[in-house]
Image (cartoon, rainbow, N blue to C red):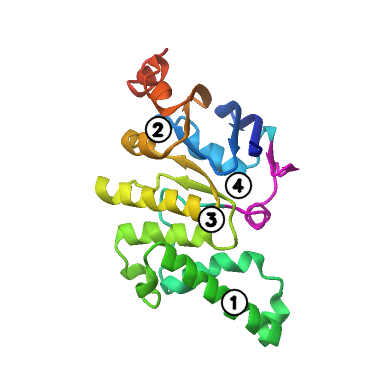
Amino acid sequence: MTHLLEAHGIHKYFGGVRAVEGIDLHVDRGEVLGIIGPNGSGKTTFFNTLTGQHPPTKGKFIFDDEDITGLPPHQVTARGIARTFQNLRTFRSLTVLENVVVGEHVKQSTGLFASLFRTKMWREEEKAARERARDCLYMVGLSRLADRLSIELSYGQQKRLELARALAGDSRLLLLDEPTSGIPLHDGMELMNLVLRIREERGVTVIIIEHNMRVMRSVADRLIAMDFGKKISEGSPDHVLSDPCVITAYLGEEC
């Protein structure tokens, strides 16, 4: 099986703080990889280095055989990597549909001139983008709410909206940061089952940061555990969740 993403020796320092230290990992095409660890272990910082918010201090990322290390976020997104955030980042003044159309714009070829003067090519691309956005909303169960303002959605529905926006633009790798936080366990399991269905239907690859171990055990093909910026365990969910180093990390002790 071919690796879709490889991370080689990723370090990220903020002054004297070593947030990520020497992370090596890979994710195969179509795989669901889970990343776990206590708060402050470097999980979200790792996502940020991958997606260009904070370029790594050392190391490199290879995505689909291309070195993407340090590319700005819009270029990372254009290559087919999309993410959701632990804290919702929906556009509250836009409709549900418009939120997803924003995600579609990353692959449009028309520029500022065409959008200002609404050229024929721009109108055609905009129509196609809205149709694809409706398909994404249908996939996550929000099509009937397409014309509602996103601020009117429940917290769980906004989580689904973020997933729909991440799917826009023909994303091949989804990075989900705490997708079930703040919602009941039943709703979280439904959301993760939706992610698995999307993986099957669209062939996407998924990396999930998640604190809910029940969720991770049920959806992840493989887990990586982090603590103090380092990888401390890797393997099947059963192997990692029973690893003494992982257990002691969550208890605040040293392995």
Q: Where, by quadrant of the figure, is residue 60 drawn?
A: top right
Q: Which mark is residue 128?
A: 1
Label 2 with label 1: CB-CB less than 8 Å: no
* Residue type, mark 4 in image: Thr
The numbered dot on residue 172 is none
Which callout, 3 or 2, points at the residue further toward the start of the chain? 2
- At 71% from the left edge and 75% from the top edge, which residue is drawn? 110
Judged by depth in the image, the label closer to the viewer, 4 or 2, is 4
Q: Give the range drawn in magenta.
A: 61-81
Rendering coords of residue 131 (x, y %): 53, 75
Which-is-in-front pick, marks 3 and 4? 3
What number is the disc on residue 39? 2
Looking at the image, is 150 positioned above or below residue 5? below
The three-letter amino acid code for the residue at tag 1 is: Ala
Percent of width and height locating residue 52: 63, 47
Distance of label 2 from label 1 (alpha carbons): 41 Å
Q: Give the residue type at disc 2.
A: Asn
Between disc 4 and disc 2, whose residue precedes? 2
Q: CA separation, marks 1 and 3? A: 19 Å
The residue tagged 4 is: 51
Q: Nearer the viewer, mark 2 or mark 1?
A: 1
Tell me the crowding category of disc 3: few under 14, some 14 to 19, or many 20 or more residues within 10 angstroms, Cα based.
some
Q: Residue at x 44, y 37 (%)?
A: 220
